[in-house]
């Protein structure tokens, strides 16, 4: 193993650790006032926050498809999911948070 390989291995290890921490995750700041209003209680068939089994078939569509469902609205969910300031990255963080077992 040369020095570059070792640096890469260390970097990959740190990155893996960081993403584990992100997944165990802090609630995103927009959650309570937007997505949480429906997803915390599975209102009108919304996949419930923290219920990985309910999220599994949704996640199978791919993150980009899910972000566009939120932006365009789906069924009862209004376009934007009641978040007027969310960027695509914010939506991804919110979806990841909701799909992670709590
Ligand atoms: C007014 C209630 C409501 C709010 C607010 C809401 N959702 Fe939803 N959401 C729903 C419902 C109901 C569904 C199920 C829709 C269906 O499958 O017909 C859903 C489905 C979804 C899905 C699955 C989409 C798919 O293609 O299967 C994602 C992802 C999602 N919501 C993310 C969010 C995010 C992120 C927010 C906050 C920015 C949010 N939702 C806010 C009610 C809501």
Image (tube, rainbow, N blue to C red):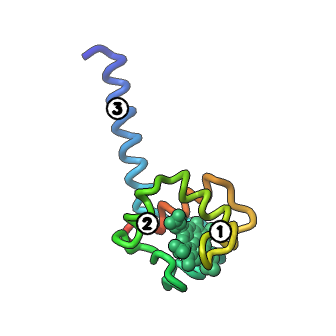
Q: In this view, does 89 lie to the left or right of 24?
A: right
**How far apart are the alpha carbons under marks 3 and 2?**
29 Å
Q: Is mark 2 on a helix, strand or loop?
A: helix
Q: Which mark is residue 10?
A: 3
Q: Give the quarter of the image for residue 16.
A: top left
Residue positioned 67% across, 63% down in the render = 72
Question: Who is closer to the viewer here, 69 or 19?
Answer: 69
Q: Where is residue 38 in the image (x, y as percent from the top left)?
A: 57, 81
N-term mark: 2 or 1: 1
Ligand 1: does it lie within 8 Å of the C-beta at label 2?
A: no
Residue positioned 69% across, 60% down in the render = 86
Q: Where is residue 4 in the image (x, y as percent from the top left)?
A: 36, 17
Q: Is mark 3 on a helix, strand or loop?
A: helix
Q: In this view, does 20 lie above or below 102?
A: above
Question: Who is closer to the viewer here, 77 or 12?
Answer: 77
| Foreground disc of the pair 3, 2 | 2
Read off the residue under disc 1: 73
Dot 1, crowdedness within 10 Å: few (<14), some or many (≥20)? some
**How far apart are the alpha carbons under marks 2 and 1?**
18 Å
Q: Which mark is residue 99?
A: 2
Quadrant of the frame with the C terminus: bottom left
């Amino acid at each position: 193993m040369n020095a570059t390989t070792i640096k890469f291995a260390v970097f990959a290890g740190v990155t893996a650790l960081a993403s584990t921490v992100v997944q165990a995750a802090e609630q995103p700041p927009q959650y309570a006032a937007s997505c949480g209003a429906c997803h915390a209680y599975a209102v009108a068939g919304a996949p419930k926050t923290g219920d990985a089994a309910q999220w599994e078939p949704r996640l199978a569509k791919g993150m980009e498809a899910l972000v566009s469902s939120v932006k365009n609205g789906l069924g009862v969910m209004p376009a934007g999911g009641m978040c007027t300031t969310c960027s695509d990255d914010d939506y991804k963080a919110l979806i990841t948070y909701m799909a992670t077992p709590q």
